[in-house]
């Protein structure tokens, strides 16, 4: 590859763990992300500032479980999404925008589907930051750790039994994942990625 060749984004590893800080125009979140493409699953453990912890288990069959594990506040929403989790090559076809200094890292920058900008460290090829423009409010993700090959034990992926009640079955038939902001973003990305 010549030094003048346009860089291409690295594929995501098949399995990784990442700690990410999100800022949605003043709404702060700490997200513990476990990506496991091999087993067709993705888990976001979401902690908003001074709020309950929300678990978001996404399966490659398009089913997502959003739940809390608080024994006094058992909540679960089951949503269906037309496609599964993001593919490791979801950045294929992204438009290269050049290099920028971001969070003290020299990064290659790409834009995909006109609503996500992705920053990757030039030296290590690890993600540093991404920005979703869909909004309002849109949001920015700062990648704090990125552990390639890290795998969460199987029991941690199981949604609690209260996600499988008759009441949740009724909700499951009528609710679509696209109701949430993240669902719309993932929905748009996934359709675009699958159409490539």
Image (cartoon, rainbow, N blue to C red):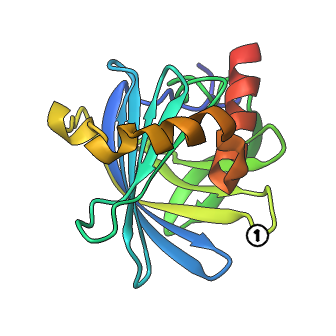
Query: In this rendering, is residue 45 above or below 23?
Result: above
Q: Find residue 132 and report its horizontal and vertical position in percent.
A: 70, 55
Does 163 sit left or right of 117 as displayed? left
Query: In this rendering, is residue 98 above or below 23?
Result: above
Question: Residue at coordinates 41% horizontally, 59% vertically from top-left?
Answer: 75
Q: Find residue 128 and report its horizontal and vertical position in percent.
A: 49, 55
Task: Identify the element where label 1 is drawn.
Answer: loop
Question: Residue at coordinates 38% horizontally, 73% vertically from top-left?
Answer: 52
Residue 110 visible here:
no
Q: Nearer the viewer, residue 161 or 141?
A: 161
Residue 130 visible here:
yes
| The quadrant where residue 5 appears | top right
Q: Which of 46 and 169 is in front in this view?
A: 169
Q: Find residue 81 and report its horizontal and vertical position in percent.
A: 63, 31
Q: Which of 118 and 132 is in front in this view?
A: 132
Does 55 sit left or right of 139 as displayed? left
Does 134 sit left or right of 63 as displayed? right
Q: Find residue 156 and report its horizontal and vertical position in percent.
A: 21, 41
- Quadrant where the N terminus sits is top right
Crowd rating for badge 1 (residues with CA inside 10 Å; few <14, some 14–19, many 20+):
few
Question: Residue at coordinates 71% horizontally, 50% vertically from top-left?
Answer: 179
- Quadrant where the C terminus sits is top right
| The quadrant where residue 138 appears | bottom right
Question: Residue at coordinates 67% horizontally, 24% vertically from top-left?
Answer: 82
| The quadrant where residue 130 appears | bottom right
Q: How many numbered marks appear?
A: 1
Q: Which residue was labeled with disc 1?
A: 137
């Amino acid at each position: 590859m010549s030094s003048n060749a346009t860089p291409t984004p690295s594929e995501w590893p098949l399995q990784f763990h990442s700690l990410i800080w999100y800022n949605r125009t003043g709404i702060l979140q700490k997200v513990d992300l476990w990506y496991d493409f091999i087993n067709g699953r993705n888990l976001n453990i979401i902690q908003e500032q001074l709020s309950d912890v929300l678990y978001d288990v996404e399966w490659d069959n398009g089913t997502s479980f959003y739940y809390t594990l608080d024994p006094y506040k058992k909540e679960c929403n089951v949503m269906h999404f037309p496609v599964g989790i993001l593919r490791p090559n979801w950045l294929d076809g992204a438009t290269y925008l050049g290099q920028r200094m971001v969070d003290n890292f020299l990064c290659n920058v790409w834009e995909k589907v006109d609503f996500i900008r992705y920053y990757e460290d030039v030296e290590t090829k690890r993600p540093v930051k991404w920005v979703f423009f869909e909004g309002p409010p849109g949001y920015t993700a700062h990648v704090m750790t990125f552990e390639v090959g890290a795998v969460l034990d199987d029991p941690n992926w199981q949604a609690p039994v209260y996600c499988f009640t008759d009441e949740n079955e009724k909700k499951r038939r009528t609710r679509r994942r696209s109701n949430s902001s993240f669902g719309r973003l993932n929905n748009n990305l996934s359709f675009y990625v699958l159409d490539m």
